[in-house]
Amino acid sequence: MTRINRIFLTAALLGAALLPASAQQAAAPAKLPPKLSTHALDTYTGKQAAGIRIDLYAVEGETRKLIKSVRANEEGRVSENLLNEADLKVGRYEIVFHVGEYYKRIGVAQTNPEFLDVVPIRVAIYDAQSRYHIPLYFSPWSYMTYRGS
């Protein structure tokens, strides 16, 4: 860290510490509503996974119930949340990304059968007042996910 960066960082920290408590509270952002959302990025082509089909299931034991099926927009994002505040309940859910179908549609050669046909991500909603964002980064041979907000 350069000397100038240290000076700016120190000034920022001191400035925040010197604010009265009421000003610090007023500056706090409003709490965003709970949700479950996703997006998909194709690491093979280096692009957003426009048009990929994504299914959301509620899971109880070994039983799955389809809640909704959506397609990602041109940015690889789902334009609506998978679950909004009114629908977000504590429980297990499975988000299924149809990567084999996606690669067929965009003309990427695959093995037969495809190494990855669908990618199921099973998650637990453990706090219905929280925000859950579960993205998928994938190629024909691998995938990665994490919990964002």
Image (cartoon, rainbow, N blue to C red):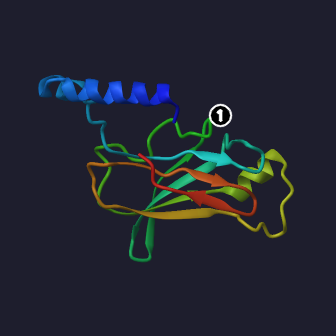
Instruction: Indicate the position of residue 134 as horizontal and vertical percent values.
Output: 49, 52
Q: Is residue 117 left or right of residue 128?
A: right
Picture layout, residue 69 above or below residue 125: above
Q: Is residue 22 left or right of residue 111?
A: left
Residue at the (27%, 53%) spot, across then down: 128
Q: Is residue 66 left or right of residue 74?
A: left
Residue at the (62%, 40%) spot, across then down: 76
Q: Secondary structure at mark 1?
A: loop
Picture layout, residue 39 above or below residue 98: above
Quadrant of the rendered structure where residue 71 is? top right
Quadrant of the rendered structure where residue 30 is? top left
Instruction: Indicate the position of residue 72 as horizontal and vertical percent values.
Output: 60, 41
Picture layout, residue 11 above or below residue 93: above
Q: Is residue 22 left or right of residue 105?
A: left
Picture mark count: 1
Looking at the rendered structure, the kind of residue marked 1 is Glu
Residue at the (39%, 47%) spot, across then down: 83
Instruction: Indicate the position of residue 4 as horizontal and vertical percent values.
Output: 48, 25
Picture layout, residue 70 above or below residue 29: below
Foreground of the two, 1 or 128 = 1
- 10 Å neighbourhood of mark 1: few (<14), some, or many (≥20)? some
User: Extreme front residue here?
Assistant: 3
User: Extreme right residue here?
Assistant: 109
Where the C terminus falls, by quadrant? Answer: top left
Provide the residue designation for mark 1. 74
Instruction: Indicate the position of residue 129 as horizontal and vertical percent values.
Output: 26, 48
